[in-house]
């Protein structure tokens, strides 16, 4: 972060944080109050301190290599199962962490985006087929399995920045990612369909229960912000249980609405005659 690839202000801030972190470590060592955590990291005192990188994190990239077998039985099983995918990504996406590929970061970004688009296409196709086979409406598959699959990268990003002490960035990432999904993730394909592919056409949404789902979503967002405010803007175990409970309530009500329990919103699925 303090290389010349970033702006002067960013380099100054990161250098200051490194100095403050080192000073706190020296003070703790002098007072004998340095307490290592379970993952061999020193405890972060100030919001945004950079954690000490251990040897396991340094070897994480090596474990993702298709030519190095990781340690542990479960890691070996996962490595064998995912080896074809790891090998394809290793051959097609430059690794910018290596010095010889540092200047190819834009190529890595573009190729990663294309691979994500391809994976998303297959994921939507498989979720649609599974939902049709089991007789589950597309809306329910969208708000459960499809939403969980597309939100895993956001969850991992929030988890990483939260462990680094940047709780405000973790919360803003969750809100910003949903706004991006709604405005850009829906706006771009609809715009391409109605302006480029079939100019002047319209895209129809076959879900009368979407209005109720949006109302539930807005209500859950309001209750989430209210819960954070009541908890004095701190992320802890109680707040985690609270938001998980809100998600369970939202999911139950959405599923019941789509199955016409409260009101009639969807026609029953027709069975195919053999």
Image (tube, grey):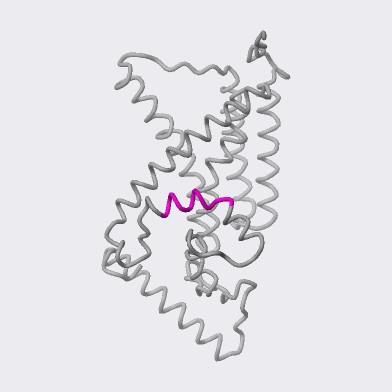
Q: Looking at the picture, how far across and down is residue 240, in whole percent?
A: 66, 51
**Where is residue 100, by image quadrant?**
bottom left
Q: Position of residue 243 (x, y in %)?
A: 65, 45
Quarter location, residue 30 = bottom right
Q: Quadrant of the N terminus?
A: bottom left
Residue 250 x %, y %:
66, 34
Question: Residue farthest to the right?
Answer: 261
Q: Which residues are magenta?
A: 81-90
Q: Position of residue 255 (x, y in %)?
A: 68, 27
Q: Quadrant of the C terminus?
A: top right
Q: Residue at x 32, y 69 (%)?
A: 11
Query: Residue at coordinates 56% horizontally, 76% vertically from top-left?
Result: 42
Q: Residue at x 39, y 44 (%)?
A: 113
Identify the residue at the far top of this view.
273
Residue 7 versus residue 123: which sits nearer the camera? 123
Total of numbered circles in the picture?
0
Query: In the visual, does 92 lie left or right of 73?
Result: left
Q: Is residue 107 above or below residue 137?
A: below
In the image, what residue occupies the spot 59% across and 83% down?
Answer: 34
Q: Nearer the viewer, residue 268 or 238?
A: 268
Q: Is residue 269 magenta?
A: no
Q: Main secondary structure of the magenta part?
A: helix
Q: Is residue 88 magenta?
A: yes
């Amino acid at each position: 972060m303090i290389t010349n690839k970033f702006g002067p202000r960013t380099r100054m801030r990161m250098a200051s944080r490194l100095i403050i972190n080192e000073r706190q470590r020296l003070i703790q060592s002098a007072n004998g109050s340095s307490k290592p955590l379970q993952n061999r990291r020193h405890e972060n005192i100030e919001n945004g301190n950079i954690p000490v990188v251990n040897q396991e994190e340094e070897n994480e990239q090596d474990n993702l290599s298709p030519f190095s077998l990781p340690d542990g039985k479960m890691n070996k099983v996962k490595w064998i199962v995912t080896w074809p995918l790891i090998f394809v990504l290793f051959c097609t996406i430059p690794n910018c962490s290596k010095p010889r590929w540092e200047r190819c970061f834009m190529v890595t970004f573009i190729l990663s985006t294309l691979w994500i688009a391809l994976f998303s296409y297959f994921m939507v196709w498989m979720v649609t087929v599974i939902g049709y086979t089991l007789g589950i409406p597309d809306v329910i598959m969208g708000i459960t399995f499809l939403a969980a699959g597309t939100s895993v990268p956001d969850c991992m990003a929030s988890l990483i920045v939260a462990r680094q002490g940047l709780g405000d960035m973790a919360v803003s990432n969750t809100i910003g990612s949903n706004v991006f999904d709604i405005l850009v993730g829906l706006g771009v394909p609809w715009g391409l369909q109605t302006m480029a592919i079939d100019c002047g056409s319209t895209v129809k949404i076959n879900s009368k229960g979407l209005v109720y789902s949006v109302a539930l979503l807005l209500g859950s967002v309001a209750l989430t912000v209210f819960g954070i405010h009541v908890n004095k803007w701190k992320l802890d175990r109680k707040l985690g249980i609270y938001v998980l409970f809100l998600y369970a309530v939202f999911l139950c009500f959405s599923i019941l609405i789509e199955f016409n329990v409260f009101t009639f919103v969807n026609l029953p699925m027709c069975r195919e005659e053999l």
